[in-house]
Image (spheres, rainbow, N blue to C red):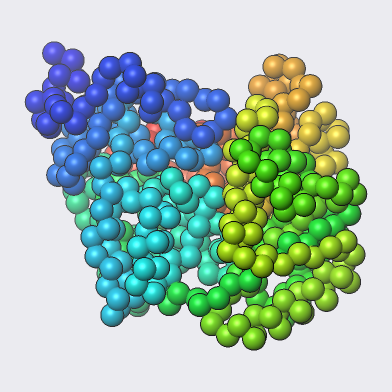
Amino acid sequence: MDWIELLKKKVDKNILFTHDEELNNYASDYTEDLVHLPQVVAKPTTVEQISEILKFCTINKIPVTPRGAGTGLSGGSLPVDGGISLSMENFNKIIDIDEDNFQATVESGVINEAFQQAVKAVGLFYPPDPASKGSCFLGGNIAHSSGGPKALKYGTTKDYVLNLEVVLPTGEIIWTGSDTLKNSTGYNLTQLMIGSEGTLGVVTKIVFKLLPLPKHDLLMLAKFDSIQDACNAVPQLFIAGTSPSALELMERSAVAYVHTHASGDTTTSLNMTADPKTKAFLLIEVDGNDLEDLFSQCEQINEVLEKNNTSEVQFADTAEQKEKLWKVRRSIGEMVKLHSIYKEEDAVVKRANLPELMEGTKTIGKEYGFESVCYGHAGDGNLHINILKGELTDEQWNGPHLEEAIRKIFRLCKKLGGTISGEHGIGLVQKKYMNEVLDPIHFTLMKGIKKTFDPSGVLNPKKIWE
């Protein structure tokens, strides 16, 4: 009897799927054009079912790959060794919103934006807002410690997690921490799980802390004839004493791809691509409860932008204009993917060094013959670099030629005080570059932790390191 038939005797066979259509649906995510077929797709509905599946896989050494919504960009949910794709889609309940304690308990398959809207309805605020917030699962956000535009002011996912229910590879079900704002009781297993990319355990429930909902937000779009001027303005905004809740950079080509491929005429109605001299945009948001103070901050921001040669500053006067501007920013990655085969790097440096990273990336692109489309979270130095295949041959694209170029970008990141991923994780596609920023002792420690949690090495194998 093969292992699939044995598994059907351990758990409800109705949660296991082996026909081709299901396997194909779980064989890829948003990472490039990679495809890895699982042998089984499991869609558990209870924590106990997950426990039985993981216990079975550990005993029989069957690979099991946790999967959220499949919106990841580093290949973290790809079942590279076959085995089981463990989908968390049925864990989609908001269990409790505790208004007295500014907390919420949710299952890990809840969609980010659905959670944001639920807490907003009672006057509370969950800030982490990845570009894929309309579809990504909170469990996936935990796996990568996701950020988003508001991470600049409010921090990333890791700053809002108090406690996690986790199923370990050996089948035990644990809570990692405490539902309290303070906890100095032993090692911080909660934070260890965040960013571990599903290699240490399967997160089933999350306790988040929440904030009061800001009453107002204002949004500005600044245009520049020079990418360097746009980048140079970023640190000066903070030196001037302003506190943006979001500060996003988009170069012209990124917005142009949205204009070309997005439905409707969003960029046209916003007049973003009309002037051919415009080379870059800064999208700047401030939020808070004192509207007069926010307008004062906008005046300060405008002064800094003018000193850095902005050609025009537009205010979003209506909720509709704000929505359109954010739609442009959030859809760039998807629109670039429609245009070309591409690889997306998630470089991050000290924000004052962003101009050097941008300039260095463009120089490396010229040296190696590729176009890069850059955009991202300028306020915290996190630049998404989309490398387009363009005229590169298949051999150059898949071989040492491009790998060498990417290594140069990452070495530059390290030189500028940064690292190779700010929020997308390492997963499958970035693991070969980990030795650019980590020493052998780091790998020894990480592999020791992995061995402790997952003695048989079955949970999300071949991710993070070679």
Quarter holding residue 394: top right
Q: Tell me if residue 161 comes above or below residue 86 in the rendering.
A: below
**Can residue 355 be seen by looking at this rendering?**
no
Counting from the top left corner in percent of width and height, residue 180 is at 30, 75
Seen from the viewer's position, the closer of residues 450 and 323 is 323
Q: Residue at x 15, y 28 (%)?
A: 14
Q: Position of residue 105 (x, y in %)?
A: 27, 63
Query: Which residue is at the front of the view, 412 or 247?
Result: 247
Residue 377 place in picture, x, y as percent:
65, 57
| Residue 421 percent location from the top left of the image | 59, 48
Q: In which image quadrant can residue 97 be found?
A: bottom left
63 to the left or right of 219: left
Residue lying furthest top: 1
Taking 355 as reference, is 153 left or right? left
Residue 165 in the figure: left or right of residue 342:
left
- What residue is shown at x 26% (from left), y 47% (from top)? 91
Q: In the picture, which quadrant includes the N terminus? A: top left
Total labels: the figure holds: 0
